Amino acid sequence: MQMNEESKDNRNTIDLVHRFEKMISLNDSYYFDMDQLEEIVDYYCETSQFQSALRAIEYGYSLFPENMTLMLRESQILTGMGHLTQALKQLKRLEKMEANEEVLLTLASIYSQQREHAKSIKLLQKALSLGSSEFTDDIYLEIALEYENMQRFDKAQETLQEAIQRSPQNEVLLYELAYVFDMNEKSAEAIEFYQRFLESFPFSFPGWYNLANAYQKINQFEEALECYDYSLAIQEDFTPAYYNKAHTLFKLERYQDAVQVFEETYAYEPPQAPVYCHIGECFEKLNQFDKALFYYRKSIQVDEFYADSYLGISITMDLMNKTIDAIPFIERAIEIEPENPDYFLFQIEFLKKLNRIDEAESIAESVIARFQENEDLWLDYSDIFFHRGEYDRALSIIQTGWQHCPQSNDLGFRQVVYLLSAGKNTDAEELMFRMAMRHPQGLNDLEEYFPDIRQNLLYLELRNQLLPE
């Protein structure tokens, strides 16, 4: 019965549109009431015929001059088409006539697009003061988003917490607050908030899910797992909780358990390429290479442009001592995602293993110009010359890299190695002391890369002082 009524309404709307278009084609004048005009305008907007919608509004003015509904719809359509100046002019007229919520929200949207976020927030707050419960949650969210656009995550957090206090069941607000906590790097505060929230609303699965994510960010994996389980106990088909639980198990090196959790999602949605790829990575970590390749290939069958699966195959081939067979797959990953520097790192590493040093050097040289902020590329590029015994060239490269990545501890410690190898012992020891004071754990990486450092007395003294066993 309901379908028949909907079908009848659709036919009536189409009949109205045909009548309007016939009038235009005959250059005639018919009468339409406001409800009919709104139907015609809505039809054109829903079918993306915005010029026709504006034409219908223009005709509507001849029947209902200065009609506020028509003026608002016109400004909204102009906003959607990107004609912000025209829309703003119309809305300012409307605001003087009646500053209702729709007018204020549309005005705020324009100011937001013009990056005048403070003006947008002022209008949104004015709309909020009108107190319509229908729009209140949305307005709070919009205010928070404007603060985010201004990088004022503290104010966004404050706004969202106020909104959640009045609408604790609003999942969108809960997820947005989690994002703001993340951007603010306030995982501990997020944990405290969601713990308090769950004391009052213990059956909120987004509450448990966001608490789990906060625990995971500070590496409290066991607590995260427990919270994911609570979330799934309340909402068993909530697949994001399964995925994040599986990733947590992966970080705990419980690879078989992670596979099992990934497979549990099959009951709720068909596995997509990332799921098969993650399962493949689990088997890769378990050294079950045939299974890893099986799942990476299943991932590609689902999505032939999923680059990480080609990367997974290349890594697995390398682990199977088939590095020569890894090359086409890493090249395919690069072809799909040429802006991902990590793929180039693996390609360079594979070429070095195959003693194709000139190719590795050529690729590193071209890629480093595009990704100057990637410290791993500077490490790999300089490493080529270090192993050739071209210590001054390696040193020059790593020093340039450090200029681009001055906060990188790895580049600083690597420079120590190159200085020692180039016979610049005083400079090397001075830098090693500074780096050890800045990041003592880097001494471990220094020794792993350059075991000969164990012969250096300053190094041994720094280890004893800063990293006592």
Image (cartoon, helix red, strand yellow):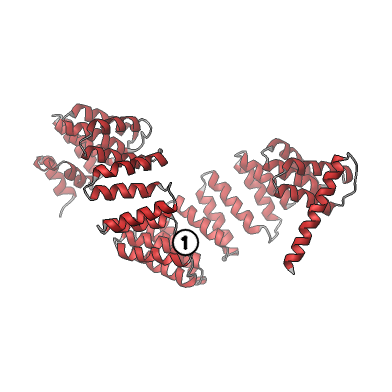
How crowded pointer 1 is (Cα within 10 Å; few <14, some 14-19, many 20+) is rated as: few
Q: Is residue 13 above or below residue 436?
A: below
Residue 384 placement (x, y as % from top left): 22, 33
Q: Is residue 14 left or right of residue 415?
A: right
Amino acid at the residue labelled 1: Pro
Please name whichever residue, 95 or 364, is drawn nearer the observer in this view of the structure: 364
Please name whichever residue, 232 or 202, is drawn nearer the observer in this view of the structure: 232
Residue 149 sits in which quadrant? top right
Going 23% across and 48% down the picture, which residue do you hit?
441
Going 65% across and 50% down the picture, which residue do you hit?
124
Kindly tell me whether residue 438 is visible in this rendering.
no
Residue 17 placement (x, y as % from top left): 80, 49
The quarter of the rendered structure image containing the N terminus is bottom right
Q: Is residue 343 left or right of residue 443?
A: right
Going 28% across and 55% down the picture, which residue do you hit?
284
Kindly tell me whether residue 380 is visible in this rendering.
yes
Please name whichever residue, 270 or 42, is drawn nearer the observer in this view of the structure: 270
Going 21% across and 31% down the picture, which residue do you hit?
385
Q: Is residue 231 above or below residue 85?
A: below
Q: In this view, does 144 lie to the left or right of 210?
A: right
Residue 172 placement (x, y as % from top left): 56, 59
Q: In this view, does 320 lie above or below 360?
A: below
Residue 316 placement (x, y as % from top left): 28, 50
